[in-house]
Amino acid sequence: MAIFIVNKSVDENALLDINLLDFDGYKPFEFISMDGFDIDDANSIKNPFVKPHNNPLPQTDGNLLTADLKPLSWNVIRLKK
């Protein structure tokens, strides 16, 4: 299962809490994001730094998944059974 999330805030992190109660046994195995660049940045041959990167896995506590989303970020959390 994949969860796609966008944080559109220019300067504030967003705390994501997802209740996995109906998805018994699913655990995160990948957390990818694009963040850490200026809103006007773009890739070029000389500067190809706007790209996805891996993050530490989100915290899980029973059936609750919690992730910190950086400002101006595109995020994917992948889970599997």
Image (cartoon, rainbow, N blue to C red):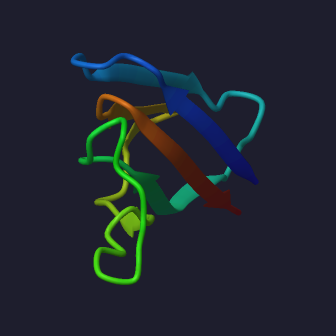
Q: Position of residue 5 (x, y in %)?
A: 58, 34
Foreground of the two, 68 or 81: 68
Q: Quadrant of residue 12?
A: top left
Against 29, residue 5 (above or below) is above
Residue at x 55% of width, y 51% of height? 77
Q: Residue at x 35, y 20 (%)?
A: 15
Left or right of 50, for residue 27: right
Question: Is residue 38 or residue 46 the one in the foreground?
Answer: 46
Q: Nearer the viewer, residue 55 or 27?
A: 55
44 relative position to 30: left or right: left
Place residue 56 in its image quadrant. bottom left
Residue 54 in which image quadrant: bottom left
Q: Residue at x 37, y 47 (%)?
A: 58
Q: Is residue 30 above or below residue 27?
A: below
Decide if residue 33 is on the left or right side of residue 47: right
Quadrant where the image shows the C terminus? bottom right
The picture places residue 65, in percent across and down from the top left corner, at 47, 35
Horizontally, is 6 left or right of 2 in the view? left
Q: Seen from this angle, which residue lies furthest bottom?
A: 45
| Residue 70 spot, x, y in % from top left | 29, 34
| Vertical arrangement, residue 43 with respect to residue 57, above or below | below
Q: Quadrant of the N terminus?
A: bottom right
